[in-house]
Image (tube, grey):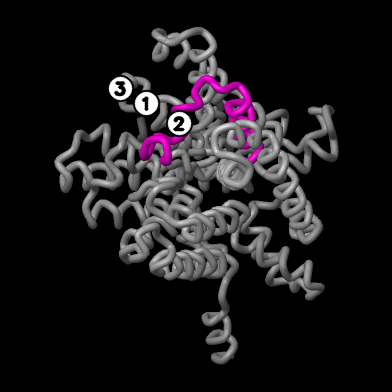
Amino acid sequence: MFRNKKQEQRHITSFQIIILGFLSIVIVGTILLMLPFATREGKGASFIDALFTATSAVCVTGLVVHDTATYWSVFGQGVILLLIQIGGMGIVTVAVAMASISGRKIGLMQRSTMQEAISAHHIGGIVRLTKFILKTTVIIEFVGAVFLMPVFYKEFGPVKGMWYSLFHSISAFCNAGFDLIGVKEQFSSLTSYSSGTMLNITVIALIVIGGIGFLTWEDIKNNKWHFKKYRMQSKVILSVSVILIIFPAIYFFFGEFNNLPLKDRIWCSLFQAVTPRTAGFNTADLTVLSQTGQMLIIMLMLIGGSPGSTAGGMKTTTIAVLFSTACSVFRKEEYTHFFNRRIPEGTVKNAATIFLMYIVLFVGGGMVISRVENLPILVSLFETASAIGTVGLTLGITPSLGLVSHLILICLMFFGRVGGLTLIFATMNSRAKNGAKYPQEKITVG
């Protein structure tokens, strides 16, 4: 009996495998980026700069301490792109896909880990879903690169144009936000293409497609336009995603970009409404936005994308559950529900826990950075929201921050990518339930 307990304690859980997988890739990426030929100067990056960049790439964030185009060599950029691809699809997804392609048998443990990694509801059909994710990713990124090719071919020629098209297609679909446009102006992101119709449409589409999640796309593939047949989760994700694009875009159109021509105003408003939900690109100078506009972006960054997607953040479903719970309280209803489906109490508790964790870490990290760096609190909060939401947008302070601030951002990026509950479940031992309950006593809230 004692031996069995010991064996159970040594058993590695799915959550621990996910965390160890991300850590392993970050470490390998850090080592590769420290190699002399990873930088244009041939000296290699320092440990902290390589660690920051590798973490940002694997966690598909996009915050950088050096301009990607001018500091890193083609090898270094290739390493970053590979880290983005692995991080976007998920470590476990890539591992299971490789095992499946090589003909190896996928065991129950691998299937269980895969289920946790992509937030799937059932373990059945998980290998088939992995193949669907792999195929969908390759097709969408290839199509995105094809549509971007005319834009970059015109400016950079055939070879460089192909590389730029592929790099930005993968970066956009994986919601990473890394770019190579620093050859024009360092840290400029996509601001020089703010009025480009083809680039705006393609990048926005890639961000949205990557951000709504593979399970939602499987629903769309199986049920086409029959919205009523979709899973309740897919309905919530699509509904919330539309709301979080339309209303911010309306605000930006009327409240921030009044001085732009109509075409530029439309594209800038739409792009800035889409990109904060963890993409990290920008086509407008975010430092000239009002504090209201910057605060709206912070809120969007914290919300992020959807479960089982390439995006980070608290997730659209988390906010939807909390909002619906509040509405249920207002209406004095016993349960939270969507589309005539009741939400389990455990889901509501998880949503509240995730929300609290994000807010505490986001505010706490911002306060520390503000104090250490002597920066305005809003600027610091913008940075921590971008890190924990794995977004990559910045008001320009990232490269100039000190060691302590960089370490805080690294931890927030990692937390935002693997998920708060995953970290907690991986570090805490689950205790067996004995059925006993404490006596109940009321406490007044609100």
Q: Quadrant of residue 363?
A: top left
Front residue of 98 and 65:
65
Q: Residues within 10 Å of mark 3 (few under 14, many from 20)?
A: few
Tell which tag, 2 or 3, sits nearer the viewer: 2
Q: Residue at x 63, y 63 (%)?
A: 92
Secondary element type, mark 3: helix
Q: Residue at x 42, y 13 (%)?
A: 257
Q: Which residue is mark 1?
A: 285
Q: In the image, which residues are magenta?
A: 182-210
Considering only vertical position in the picture, is 106 above or below 312? below
Q: Which residue is mark 3?
A: 291
Label placed on residue 282? 2
Q: Are the residues tagged 2 and 1 within 8 Å (C-beta)?
A: yes
Give the spatial CA distance, label 2 vs label 1: 7 Å
Which quadrant: the N terminus?
Answer: bottom right
Q: Residue at x 54, y 19 (%)?
A: 267
